[in-house]
Image: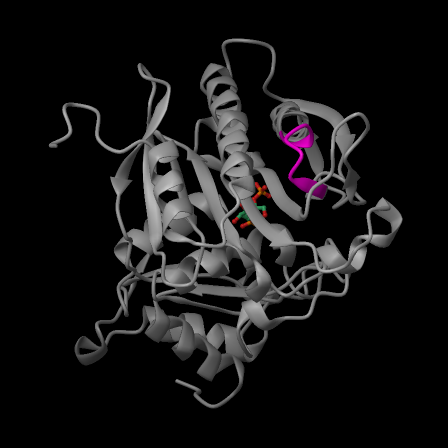
Amino acid sequence: MEKQGLGITITEHILKQQRENPEATGAFTILLNELIVAAKVISREVNKAGLVDIIGATGGVNVQEEQVQKLDVFANQVTIERLQHVGQLCCMGSEENADLIDIPPPYPKGNYILLFDPLDGSSNIDVNVSIGTIFGIYRKQSDETNIDMLLNDALQPGIKQVAAGYFIYGSSTIMVYTTGNGTGVHGFTLFPSLGEFLLSHENIRTPEKGKIYSVNEGNYDYWDEKTRALVDYFKARDRETGRPYTSRYVGSLVADFHRNLLKGGIFMYPADNKDPKKPSGKLRLMVEANPLAMVVKEAKGYASDGHGPILEIDPAELHQRTPLYIGSKKDVELAEAFISGKKRG
Ligand code: FDP
């Protein structure tokens, strides 16, 4: 029977994927649904920012020694509160918390681990620029239940993610997610009057080669020669290879990534020598690079740290940072050729 009016809701879509996977227990569906509830609450609050006294800094710093905004704290709390009671998680890891987050009694524990960045791009909160939530989900590998013993389970390479995605709070609120293994990357737009995410971007494929490069070029002097040569290459004029590329940089990873996913191109946050404490650049492997790397891979793109796939990095710590080159496959492979020194210009 033809659908009347509404289109496909996110819940319908997740349930369909569950039916198509003979091993699915429904646990995962519950988990994603609760994540969506958290995102709806965050979206509502983001849209109110400026109307109530919730924007602006709390005055504190997070574990990354960055200023914490009130909305970051709110988004973190909402996500933890919504997800801790579902019974599917054994622990969570957030960009805002130094250590893994336990599931407190009386809530039952499950076999999944949620790693997330509750509000990415937070320096853009009070200027009405798009921000987002990024998440990656892993299956626990050990039989441990004690939080002190679960770090190894949380520190799996990104290739082990069973789902990943993000929410963008922008001109509209969009959720993009994948469960990998050829199931595709799908985007859903929140219809505020219905309070429902409806399928708006089915089976996203990113172009094999793009025309956009996205990088904070203010860091040019902090980069090594290879990185500079790469950016110079994108800016040089050459009709045959479609150069110069167009520069686009919002400074909000989710927004920059989403644009390039749809239009093609490369986002990069290279290693630099700006801060001796962050030699690998600014972005976090577990809560930023890995989830987006899973999404881009499923959309036929690629994510690299300049030397090899992000998804194959064996993590050593929860808040590990990594250089990131992500987007259209050909553009990211080109970046790798520069960063490895195989190509010079
Ligand atoms: P923010 O500090 O505003 O939270 O990882 C955080 C992040 O934003 C990314 O969203 C963004 O791509 C990047 O940092 C921007 O960093 P620069 O200001 O150094 O360009």
Q: Position of residue 297 (x, y in %)?
A: 42, 64
In the image, residue 241 above or below residue 45: below
Q: Is residue 41 magenta?
A: no
Q: Position of residue 321 (x, y in %)?
A: 67, 59
How many numbered dots are placed on residues in this image? 0
> Looking at the image, what colour scheme do you see?
one colour
Q: Locate the C terminus and report the quarter of the image it occupies.
A: bottom left
Q: Quadrant of residue 84?
A: top right
Residue 216 visible in the picture: no
Q: Quadrant of residue 199?
A: top left
Q: Quadrant of residue 273?
A: bottom right
Q: Residue furthest bottom?
A: 342
Q: Locate the N terminus and report the quarter of the image it occupies.
A: top left
Residue 191 visible in the picture: yes
Q: In the image, 19: left or right of 161?
A: left
Q: Along the line of sight, which residue is nearer the eye, 318 or 259?
A: 318
The residue drawn where x is 61% and y is 50% is 287
Q: Along the line of sight, which residue is nearer the eye, 340 or 248?
A: 340
In the image, residue 13 above or below residue 171: below
In the image, residue 8 above or below residue 232: above
The residue drawn where x is 33% and y is 47% is 186
Q: Position of residue 180 (x, y in %)?
A: 44, 59
Q: Residue furthest top?
A: 52
The residue drawn where x is 14% and y is 24% is 4
In magenta, the rendered stretch is 83-90
The residue drawn where x is 66% and y is 65% is 280
Q: Position of residue 243 (x, y in %)?
A: 25, 71
